[in-house]
Amino acid sequence: MAKRLLIIDDNEGYASIVARYFVAVGGYEVETACCGAEGLEKASRMKFDVVLADMMLPDMDGCDVARELERKGVESPVAILSGYEAQKVIKWGMAKSGLPGNLRRVLSKSEKLGEILVKVNGLSGDALAV
């Protein structure tokens, strides 16, 4: 059975490129959402093996998405995809109200798609990997 991935990113062109890559190369089934609210709704209705959320969405940030998924009892691990450095994202999340427990990775949008795929495939355990 194929793994299921939810990509939450307001840059629809980038989300489409990532989605096509994960389908073609990774064998994933992929859903996309263009804002946090839509992503939360989809994640509440469907089970995903991984949620990949952009850090800066129009209605909330990636840490807020992860925090809200955790609050709703959605057990999918979350990776944040950002143009910012991982340490800056972590500091941002800590300053707001701590990092959510379901946050497993902070990935850079500058990474090659193959590197992102490998890191998403490796999401497991309970610890945040940078």
Image (cartoon, rainbow, N blue to C red):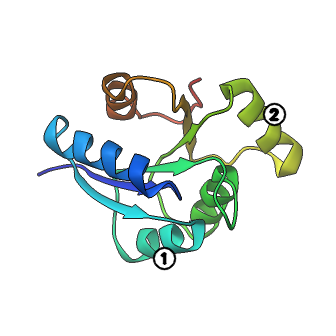
Which percent across, then down, holds residue 4?
27, 54
Looking at the picture, which amino acid does disc 2 mark?
A: Lys
Which percent across, then down, holds residue 80?
56, 42
Q: Element under label 1?
A: helix
The number of callouts visible is 2
Front position in the image: 83 or 44: 83
Which percent across, then down, holds residue 3?
23, 49
Residue on which disc 2 sits:
91
- Residue sitting at 68 percent across and 68 percent down? 59
Q: Quadrant of residue 44?
A: bottom left
Q: Is residue 58 above or below residue 130?
A: below
Mark 1: few/some/many CA within 10 Å (<14, 14-19, 20+): few
| 111 sits left or right of 73 in the view | left
- Residue sitting at 77 percent across and 43 percent down? 93
Which residue lies most toward the left here? 1
Q: Is residue 112 above or below residue 20?
A: above
Locate the C terminus by quadrant.
top right
| 77 sits left or right of 63 in the view | left
In the picture, the disc for residue 116 is none
- Residue sitting at 34 percent across and 65 percent down? 47
Q: Element under label 2?
A: helix
Residue on which disc 1 sits:
41
- Residue sitting at 32 percent across and 25 percent down? 118
Which percent across, then down, holds residue 108?
55, 29
Q: Quadrant of residue 84?
A: top right
**N-term-proximal mark, 1 vs 2:** 1
The alpha-carbon separation of the residues under discs 1 and 2 comes to 27 Å
